[in-house]
């Protein structure tokens, strides 16, 4: 395999965990470049289901080196819980490395996330409430606490004291004081110490030695802070290009960029979603696709596949292939639709408009397809799919000009056609 970036093409939850795990078999390293424990990646293998939030999906393979890059924000307490949960399922962490430059999500970030979200009222974003936005805000404001700071006690104490003062209002009446936050981090630091390192240096050396790397994106293209449906986005760059910044390596290392897309569309949180279905078909997708957030348990909004969204993802990420997931969920629908364009103020457009307000006014122009009745969860090669499913796939490929190289027909590892 070539060094490959895996990126979400929609609003997250496309099934990146499964695809990363599938491709990780052929890679020596899985490296994640952005986001934090707002992500929820599910991997089903060997009859077990693993839920990952911070940790790259390659960790299930004992020999795979897993890297959490500098572009991530890390909640050390939640990371330990995640490790304990996975550890109880037999996963071990001797191959996990965390960048000393990744930023720490502190208790006040979580408190601020919920108070800011409350203050937004009608304009609420629907954040996961994990403190992601406030942690990235402190990073950009040049006052964040980095993982490496946990090993310089004087600096750590000073930084926490500063934040305890600055964020006194939100901390008031909670169990969190400067001392308690300092002591907890010192305790955690000891457990994380064997994993904390200069991951840019490590990755660079491994790449030079010819080890193959999967760069694992979190969230999705339309949740990107610059290129997503702003302001209904996360606070980091989730598109493929950020792998270089978020890991401290050259963009020259990558040859393939695989975009993961569901065979339909989902979104959690608020914000525009032109092909959303608030009818029986949407409910069918919700139920059959078990469309509930891995991180928050919230039901996801469901709708038809949206080609203006995917064309955009092809363009801003430079996709070389597509992994189409959950095709099996569409079995049993008598007909299917794909949005091929939008009508905006009476004019037909094929590309996403710049703002969420404009996208909210877009009315999808649909092309209708025949559905298929057969369950396809056991299909193991493309020609074995019903003709209507093949027609659906071929239309997508032709429109996007990118091959669908992986088709997922169920959560299990073997339910994959490649
Ligand atoms: P935040 O990242 O918690 O600030 O949430 C901002 C927006 O991104 C909200 O709409 C969340 O629901 C959404 N979001 C963040 N992470 C994920 C994810 O991994 N999957 C799907 N949506 C996400």
Image: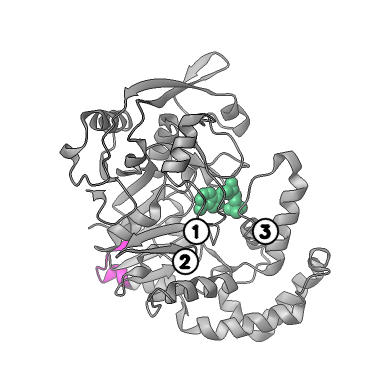
User: Which region of the structure is painted magenta?
Assistant: 206-213
Q: Earlier in the sequence, mark 1 or mark 3?
A: 1
Under 8 Å from ligand 1: the CB of mark 2? no
Q: What percent of the width, then of the height, locates residue 334?
A: 34, 25
Q: What percent of the width, then of the height, locates residue 152?
A: 62, 84
Which of the 4 quarters of the picture holds residue 181? Answer: bottom right
Please state which of residues 378 and 54 is positioned toward the viewer in this rendering: 378
Which residue position holds label 2?
69
Residue at left 40%, top 77%? 93
Q: From the viewer's perspective, tell me whether residue 240 is left or right of residue 170.
A: left
> Height in image: 279 above or below 329?
above
How far apart marks 2 and 3 lie (CA) works out to 19 Å
Q: Is residue 363 visible?
A: yes
Which of the 4 quarters of the picture holds residue 405? Answer: top left
Q: Are marks 2 and 1 in contact (CB under 8 Å)?
A: yes
Residue at left 52%, top 29%? 279
Q: Secondary structure at mark 1?
A: loop
> Height in image: 375 above or below 20?
above
Q: Secondary structure at mark 2?
A: loop
Please state which of residues 8 and 370 is positioned toward the viewer in this rendering: 370
Residue at left 46%, top 49%? 13
On residue 134, the disc is 3
* Residue farthest toward the top in the current orientation of the protein: 346
Classed neighbour count for the residue bearing mark 1: other residues with Cα under 10 Å, few (<14), some (14–19), many (≥20)? many
Q: Earlier in the sequence, mark 2 or mark 1?
A: 1
Q: Earlier in the sequence, mark 2 or mark 3?
A: 2
Which residue position holds label 1?
34
Q: Secondary structure at mark 3?
A: helix
How far apart marks 2 and 1 lie (CA) works out to 7 Å
């Amino acid at each position: 395999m070539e060094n490959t970036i895996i990126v979400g093409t929609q609003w997250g939850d496309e099934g990146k965990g499964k695809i990363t795990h599938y491709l990780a078999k052929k890679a020596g390293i899985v490296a994640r470049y952005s986001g934090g424990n707002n992500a929820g990646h599910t991997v089903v293998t060997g009859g077990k289901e693993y839920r990952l939030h911070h940790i790259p999906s390659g960790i299930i393979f004992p020999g795979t080196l897993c890297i959490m890059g500098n572009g991530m924000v890390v909640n050390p307490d939640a990371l330990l819980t995640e490790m304990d949960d996975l550890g109880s399922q037999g996963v071990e962490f001797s191959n996990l490395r965390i960048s000393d430059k990744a930023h720490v999500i502190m208790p006040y970030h979580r408190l601020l996330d919920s108070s800011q979200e409350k203050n937004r009222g009608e304009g609420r974003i629907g954040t996961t409430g994990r403190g992601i936005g406030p942690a990235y805000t402190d990073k950009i404001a040049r006052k964040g606490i980095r993982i490496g700071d946990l090993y310089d006690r004087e600096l750590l104490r000073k930084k926490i004291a500063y934040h305890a003062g600055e964020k006194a209002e939100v901390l008031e009446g909670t169990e969190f004081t400067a001392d308690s936050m300092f002591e907890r981090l010192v305790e955690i630091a000891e457990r994380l110490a064997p994993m904390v390192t200069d991951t840019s240096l490590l990755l660079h050396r491994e790449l030079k030695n010819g080890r193959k790397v999967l760069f694992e994106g979190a969230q999705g293209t339309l949740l990107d802070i610059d290129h997503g449906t702003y302001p209904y986005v996360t606070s980091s760059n989730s598109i493929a290009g950020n792998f270089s910044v978020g890991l401290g390596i050259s963009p020259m290392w990558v040859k393939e960029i695989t975009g993961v897309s569901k065979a339909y569309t989902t979104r959690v949180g608020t914000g525009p979603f032109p092909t959303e279905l608030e009818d029986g078909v949407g409910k069918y997708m919700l139920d059959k696709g078990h469309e509930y957030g891995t991180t928050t348990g919230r039901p996801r909004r469901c709708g038809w596949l949206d080609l203006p969204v995917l064309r955009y993802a092809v363009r801003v990420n430079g996709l070389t292939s597509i992994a189409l997931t959950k095709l099996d969920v569409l079995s049993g629908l008598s007909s299917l639709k794909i949005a091929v364009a939008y009508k905006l103020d009476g004019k037909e457009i094929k590309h996403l408009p710049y703002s969420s307000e404009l996208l909210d006014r877009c009315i999808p122009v649909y092309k209708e397809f025949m559905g298929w009745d057969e369950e396809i969860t056991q299909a193991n090669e493309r020609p074995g799919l019903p003709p209507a499913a093949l027609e659906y796939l071929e239309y997508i490929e032709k429109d996007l000009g990118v091959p669908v190289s992986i088709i997922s027909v169920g959560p299990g590892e073997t339910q994959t056609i490649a």
